[in-house]
Amino acid sequence: MPYFADLILPLPLENRFTYSLSQEEAEFIQPGMRLAVQFGKSRIYTGIVAEIHQNPPTIYEAKPIHQILDKKPLLTKEQLAFWKWIASYYLCAEGDVMRAALPGAFLLESESIVKLSKDTEIENEVLTDDEYLVVEALQRQSSMKIQEVEQLLDRKKVLPVINNLVAKNLVALNQEIYEQFKPKQVRYIKLNSIYEAEVEMHQLLDDLSRAPKQREIVLSYFSISAHSKKPLKVKELLNASGASNTVLKSLIDKKIFEEYYEETDRVVFSGEINQHEIILNKIQQKAFQELKDNFEERQVCLLHGVTSSGKTEIYIRLIEEAINKGKQALYLLPEIALTTQLIKRLQNYFGDKVLVYHSKYSVNERVEIYKKVLDNSEKGKIVIGARSCIFLPFQDLGLIVVDEEHESTFKQFDPAPRYHARDAAVVLANMFEANIVLGSATPSIESYFNAQHNKYSLVELNRRYGNVLMPEVEVVDIKTAHRKKKMTGHFSERLVEEIKESLTEEEQVILFQNRRGFSPILECNTCGHSPQCPNCDVSLTYHSHNNQLRCHYCGYHIAMQLQCMACGSNEVTTKGFGTEQVETELKALFPKSKIARMDQDTTRGKHAYEKIIQAFENHETDILIGTQMLTKGLDFRKVSLVGIMNADNLLNFPDFRAHERSFQLMLQVAGRSGRTKKRGKVLIQTYNPHHQIIQQVSTGDYLAMYKEQLEDRYQYQYPPYFRLIRLTLKCKDYSKTNEAADWLARALENVFDRYVLGPEFPPVARIRNEYYKNILIKIPQKRSLGKTKNMVHRILKSFNAIGAYRSVRVVVNVDPQ
Ligand code: ADP
Ligand code: ZN
Ligand code: ZN
């Protein structure tokens, strides 16, 4: 009987692909291992074994595999099941999940390698100059990658040259697989053991008396090893003795020292554990106990605790209990870059048990973390990181914490899999029978709804830690302020007064300006023209620091225009305002204060966030201006005032979640104020002081917001009452986009009837010269989700079979945010 393996390949294929195995291979190979296989004409891919069986594929003949890449599985069976769930829930391929889930270094790639053919006589005269160069180089170095040939010939298109050489039977093309991951090697040094005896040691020092530099190294070695038995790095020894590598080399040559290499952990925690015991106050203690009691009955618990109520300390205690039982814990965050403070807190408590998984880490660092989690090693019982952490190979997960569970960044937008890490984490927890706590000061409507309907349990914390009062919120009506001429630029008189007062008291200020869609754009006062991006349907935004007009969608940019490009008038002004403008105005108002800005432009570098946050923490900055980055769980001690420059930008955003989001954002920013003894203040500038959301923010009334929004959601058929699937069609051809969208919408309406909305152009209907059109499917609660998705899937298959629409791509987004 033949054997077969079904493989997941890192490609957007609908099905797994079957390969044949020898009996020997079949006995060795287990699900979760990597195999190198040929797919398509010649390319070699890394596939993951999902299943081994004895049923030959019916449509095609199974090819043998190329190579086995692992000795033991790299994936757990839970991961395989989890991938399958994600692919089917979010309507994507398992291959898409694979690419998102594994560090790139695990996906061996094939690269063409050029070699000289064996036993061929080379007759130079038949070769062109280029061909000659390649052959000559190959005589020297036996094999070359295509890239290297490109470098050699100093141009990009070298394949024709190689093809000719292959045709002349002079060179051969091989596919070769290489493993990208290279463990970091550290060079260590030790003294030859014969010198451990005292007599030999003295002899050695005498022998070296005429080589003082060498003697110095040996002496340093003795002095270090006298008080530390740890392996000694070459670098440490050289630092201690001040000697050079050459001197050490001569000692190694003389066999006095031996050098050796060991793999090291790239990701090391260098701090100390300050394991201060956390003593929960009464309210926290009660919440902690409630959480544990709830876990007896339900796995998912929503922890709704106001800002600064001490949720983190409760998480720490839950994590501690999980790892004391020998289990692993996962701490999910919306965005890792902003959380140095939190990471420090966890490391202070758990030391090197904490691993941080960071998308900015190098591939190799990520591989190391992956392997530690797979080995269930002591270092790494606790993993903290952003959404992709859910793909790590947990062995025995006991607890998941989803901090700031309301954040939309938990949802991956592009590319597939477009998963929501919070929702997927609930499924993951279920697979491990682990507990999961979703925490927030402003829970998402969906999660609160689930808690209200007993799907999740609920624990509430209504007091700030240390009984600090919630900040006092004042709403400033800027319409009236404008009329009464009480505005300086974008600053109301009240805001300026409050800033002044805080600064006099030597306290700090945070100013929040969401610039999404409201960055300054250039407009002509004469004809009303504003410069547009040639590739996208948006106006260019003005950036003062480099005096440019830029497109936020495709990066297109031109120099700032002083004349209208349409009518030539000199009267051009900027409209709308972003953080940059706030900064400029603020500097004019408070020339003596130290002002910093935190937004996408100032936080590009690897440690840029940390520097800004650190400077603010150390009170080297008085006022910090920023976008929503500021809302994310930062804990500053001396902020007494938070100003929201313009609340209306948020409220007017065309999205059914805009009101919920505005509430969350404003309450979270407000929560940065007055976290220690003194009561903080929040000033909200708005044109709509009576807007219900503004009112709910000022009273901090989450429940009122929830109830009101829920009514709207019910009435207009949105989540949590209806589930959504959004299909986005993309194509460079305008009329083809329209035709295809109409076809697809009609096909969907045949099945889903009035629950299909659109097709409709989104607010920005063209990006990078591609047209976008959306279709929205609403799924009522009573309808089967699985059946609906099967139907959508089938319709998309028929759509993809239409030749005329081949240039149209359809992006499927389940539960769009
Ligand atoms: P949240 O996450 O709910 O916004 P935090 O956990 O950041 O709140 O707590 C707010 C502040 O109170 C932090 O500075 C934290 O160190 C402090 N804190 C909370 N609970 C305790 C405790 N039990 N003992 C000492 N300090 C605490
Ligand atoms: Zn003009
Ligand atoms: Zn553009």
Image (cartoon, helix red, strand yellow):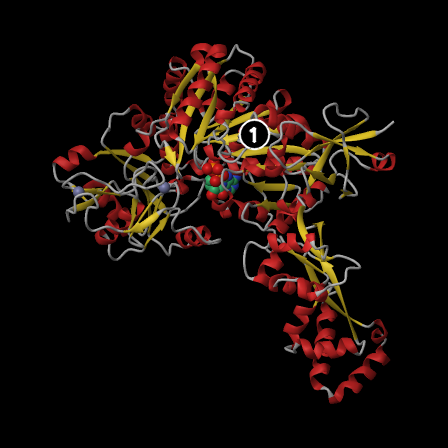
Q: In this view, does 622 lie above or below 479?
A: below
Q: What element carries label 1?
A: strand
Please name whichever residue, 366 or 438, is drawn nearer the observer in this view of the structure: 366
Q: Quadrant of ligand 3?
A: top left
Residue lying farthest bottom?
A: 210
Name the residue nearer the viewer: 229 or 431: 431
Q: In this view, does 534 lie above or below 221?
A: above
Q: Residue at x 67, y 58 (%)?
A: 144
Q: Can residue 817 be seen in this view?
A: no
Q: In this view, does 740 lie above or below 502?
A: above
Q: Name the residue tied to disc 1.
A: 437
Q: In which quarter of the image is residue 427?
A: top right
| Position of the C terminus by quadrant | top left
Most extreme residue toward the left is 484
Is 446 on the left-hand or right-hand side of 217? left
Q: In this view, does 499 lie to the left or right of 52?
A: left
Instruction: Note whether residue 90 is visible.
Output: yes
Asked whether 114 or 284 is in front, the reply is: 114
Query: Which amino acid lies under the numbered mark 1 shown in the image of this protein?
Result: Val
Q: Which residue appears at 83% of the width and 34% of the height?
A: 26
For the residue carrying disc 1, how many other residues have a C-alpha within 10 Å: few (<14), some (14-19), or many (20+)? many
- Whether the residue carrying mark 1 lies under 8 Å from ligand 1 is answered with no
Where residue 306 appears, as percent x and y from the top left, is: 43, 32
Left or right: residue 676 versus residue 691 is right
The quarter of the picture where the N terminus appears is: top right
x and y, in percent, of residue 505 in the image: 29, 50
